[in-house]
Image (spheres, grey):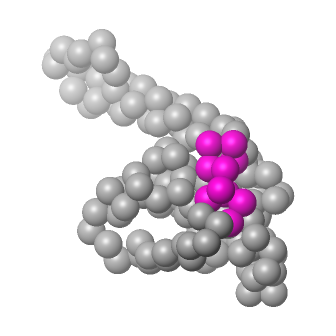
């Protein structure tokens, strides 16, 4: 990546954004995070290093547990720092993924919790139906 410029592709209106995230190395999301947004979580699960702003829930470690080095107060004012970080991530993607570990673990745990809660709800709504133990 030393002599090549990264390619930026917006994912906001793509029908199959997960396919793109599976080949991406970095996911940038500097929008307002009204809650635990879906696409940054999918990006983390797809192996991307996620960079966010500090708007909304992205500023709260419990919602988006990324180290401060991956969160930007004002990305437009930190463009040089952001550019260098993206280049570092592209040069050592596997090494930088360690910064994503806590976020990925949180998303995985929430996914499992959701499956369990959904199974319990289904059992309460439809007690006469037998459910698979996969839930």
User: Which residue occupies the extreme left position in the image?
Assistant: 129
Q: Quadrant of residue 129?
A: top left
Q: Is residue 7 above or below residue 121?
A: below
What's the residue at 40%, 52% (across, down)?
A: 22
Q: Is residue 117 visible?
A: no
- The N terminus: image quadrant: bottom right
Side of 12 relative to 71 (left or right): left
Q: Quadrant of residue 58?
A: bottom right
Side of 11 relative to 29 (left or right): left
Which x, y percent locates residue 132? 24, 15
Side of 40 relative to 12 (left or right): right
> Total of numbered circles in the picture?
0
User: Which residue occupies the extreme bottom position in the image?
Assistant: 76
User: Which residue occupies the extreme front position in the image?
Assistant: 3
What's the residue at 52%, 34% (across, down)?
A: 108
What's the residue at 73%, 51% (across, down)?
A: 66
In depth, the one of 68 and 121 nearer the eye is: 68
The residues colored magenta run: 87-96
Which x, y percent locates residue 5? 57, 76
- The C terminus: image quadrant: top left
Residue 30 magenta-highlighted = no
What's the residue at 44%, 76% (across, down)?
A: 9
Q: Is residue 133 above or below residue 49?
A: above
Which x, y percent locates residue 116? 42, 26
């Amino acid at each position: 990546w030393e002599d090549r410029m990264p390619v930026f592709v917006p994912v906001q209106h793509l029908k199959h954004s997960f396919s793109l995230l599976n080949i991406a190395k970095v996911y940038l999301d500097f929008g307002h995070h009204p809650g635990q947004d879906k696409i940054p979580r999918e990006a983390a699960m797809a192996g991307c290093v996620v960079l966010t702003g500090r708007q909304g829930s992205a500023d709260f470690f419990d919602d988006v547990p990324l180290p401060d080095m991956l969160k930007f107060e004002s990305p437009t004012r930190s463009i040089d720092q952001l550019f260098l970080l993206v280049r570092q991530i592209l040069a050592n993607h596997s090494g930088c993924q360690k910064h994503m570990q806590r976020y990925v673990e949180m998303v995985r745990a929430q996914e499992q919790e959701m499956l369990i809660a959904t199974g319990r709800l289904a059992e309460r709504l439809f007690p006469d139906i037998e459910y698979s133990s996969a839930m």
